[in-house]
Image (tube, rainbow, N blue to C red):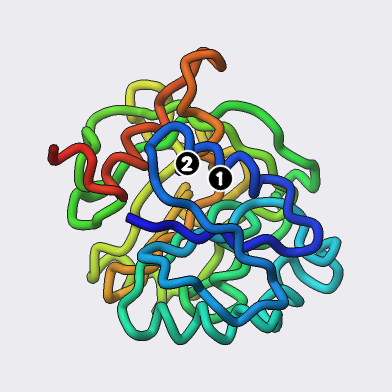
Amino acid sequence: MKVGVVIFPGSNCDQDAIYAFRNQFGCETAELWHKDHDLQSCDLIFLPGGFSYGDYLRSGAIARFSPIMQNVIEFANKGGLLMGVCNGFQILCESHLLPGALLHNDHQKFNCKNVFIKPETNNSLITSGLNLNQGFKIPIAHGEGRYYCDETTLAELKANDQILFRYSDENGNVNDSTNPNGSLENIAGICNKNRNVFGMMPHPERAIDAELYNTDGRGIFESLLKLSLI
């Protein structure tokens, strides 16, 4: 699988993603500059975390209008695989490729710590190989990570099995005490109706290397890249 990592001015997790795909999982990995229009025949496009365009206006609001996003949106609408983490998730929501929005954390502070997330479904490429009864330790680093949508959208997410992850404890228990930012119903990640666009606030690319004493993110990448089926 060939992976393209989009780099915006202010991206700061692009190299983490490139290292994950190229060095940890052996994927041919292209670095895609925000001003370009060529997706270089990639099979998967990854929007990394960071502070695209300084997070002026709303996080992801300016990046949504980057030249390359015209091609990324077209790619996704044709069924191409697209994943966004943290700022990438915000850009996906701003681009209306995913429903809802990411608001300021309810405590108005920047979160930078390890949390646990529980997969909610195996009916998604990104969660297909994960244990639904397990909490996965994944880092977060965001100031605007509080997922929100209206009641109609929430009902659709549930009916279509689009909720991928919820914030939990290490045993997979979901409650108010495990919610780090006030996200609606502890939602940490979702997908679109066609199940080819994935967004999440936690950073699985920062939890794949044994040298960092945390490999809980590997299963997410293995599911996405279908390595878990080999």
Q: Is 54 on the left or on the right of 226, as rendered?
A: right
Q: Which residue is mark 1?
A: 18
The correct choice, above or below, for 2 with respect to 207 in the image is below
The residue at the point 68 percent across, 67 percent down is 33
Number of numbered labels in the structure image: 2
In the figure, residue 180 lies in which quadrant? top right
Q: Amino acid at mark 2?
A: Arg
Neighbourhood count class around disc 2 (C-alpha, 10 Å): few under 14, some 14–19, many 20 upward:
some
Query: Observer-nearest residue: 15 or 50?
Result: 15
Q: Which residue is mark 2?
A: 22
Query: Observer-nearest residue: 228 or 120?
Result: 228
Counting from the top left corner in percent of width and height, residue 32 is at: 61, 65
- State the SS at label 1: helix
The residue at the point 77 percent across, 41 percent down is 110
Q: Is residue 176 visible?
A: no
The correct choice, above or below, for 42 with respect to 225 in the image is below
Q: Quadrant of the N terminus?
A: bottom left
Counting from the top left corner in percent of width and height, residue 137 is at: 46, 26
Q: Quadrant of the C terminus?
A: top left
Neighbourhood count class around disc 1 (C-alpha, 10 Å): few under 14, some 14–19, many 20 upward:
many
The residue at the point 36 percent across, 65 percent down is 43
Q: Is 102 on the left or on the right of 41, as rendered?
A: right
The correct choice, above or below, for 4 with respect to 41 in the image is above
